[in-house]
Amino acid sequence: MSRLTEEMIQQVVRWVGKAGDRLDDPDAIRTVTPKSKTDFVTNVDVSVEQFLRRRLMELTPWAQFLGEEGEKTPIDPARPFWILDPVDGTTNLIHGFRHSAVSLALAEDGEITFGVVCQPYTRECFTAMRGKGAFRNGCSIRVSGVEHLADGLISAGTVPGRRDLADMAFEQMRRIYDVCQDVRRTGCASLDLCWVACGRLDGFVEQHLQPWDYAAGLLIVEEAGGRVTALDGAPLSLTQGGGVLASNGMLHHQLMKQLEG
């Protein structure tokens, strides 16, 4: 059971929505700093993380904080901790692609108990509490009823930050493409997961992600009736990155078969 009250949850969702408004401001980006050839941080990423971290630490002083940006402090997984991606889809943001999100989750007792993903451009906010279902703007959502991969629409990531995995990723994407209706690539993992949760996608696969990319979406998919695992079906780590496979549940083993070759 989460230590968050309903009032606290509503406050956190409001804060995430307010932070997300910064992504929708075309004049907000003032600096773009490369972390690598394919990974960037903007002043928007930093300001969103600072805004949310400060408020979360005031609201929940008993929780640790794991964010994509800023200083990384060791996390004790036995204690509660927030997991934040201040801008999931920074490359999209830089290019004005208008498909990015703020993703926040709370981990307690080794599992995600609360998750929220806000997409400011479409004014969509996906939320979930463990055992209480998943929602889009307050309305209940469910995964699709697609039973056969041949009828499925699947999102497949291209691992731009791990080009050493590119050959494998594209080979697997081709195998999935050959047996499904079509493949999509959006550049925002948290929203891909939410779209699996609400039935817009039937599955999602990415060779390598970090916990802040998938923590909130993991719970939202599960509470919508779907399944999220590592590529081999094992549970995902909440403190270390790895490959991610999400589905409506019925397609999970079919997708794993394609990944195996």
Image (cartoon, rainbow, N blue to C red):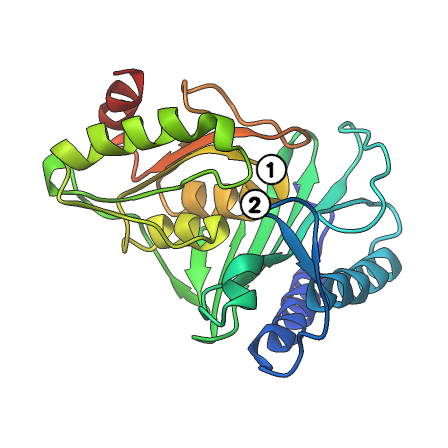
- Which mark is drawn over residue 251? none
Which residue: 34% across, 50% down?
185
Name the spot of residue 139 as percent of width and height, x first.
39, 67
Q: Is residue 148 visible?
A: no
Residue in the foreground of this view, choosing between 155 and 11: 155
Q: Position of residue 28 (x, y in %)?
A: 67, 79
Residue drawn 61% across and 45% down? 37
| Between 244 and 9, the one nearer to me in the picture | 244
Using the rendered image of the protein, determine whether residue 177 is visible from the camera's viewpoint. yes
95 in relation to 188, above or below: below
Q: Is 168 left, or right, of 95 in this rendering?
A: left
Q: Position of residue 246 (x, y in %)?
A: 38, 36
Q: Secondary structure at mark 1?
A: loop
Residue 178 is situated, as x and y percent measured from the top left of the image, at 14, 33
Instruction: Give the quadrant of residue 215.
Output: top right
Q: Amino acid at mark 2?
A: Asp
Left of 229 or right of it: where is 36? right
CB under 8 Å between callouts 1 and 2?
Answer: yes
Mark drawn on residue 213:
2
Give the quadrant of the N terminus: top right
Q: Residues within 10 Å of mark 2 (few under 14, many from 20)?
A: many
> Which residue is labeled 1 in the image?
210
In 3D space, how far apart are the residues under numbered discs 1 and 2 (Cα atoms)?
5 Å
Q: Secondary structure at mark 2?
A: helix
The amino acid pointed to by label 1 is Gln
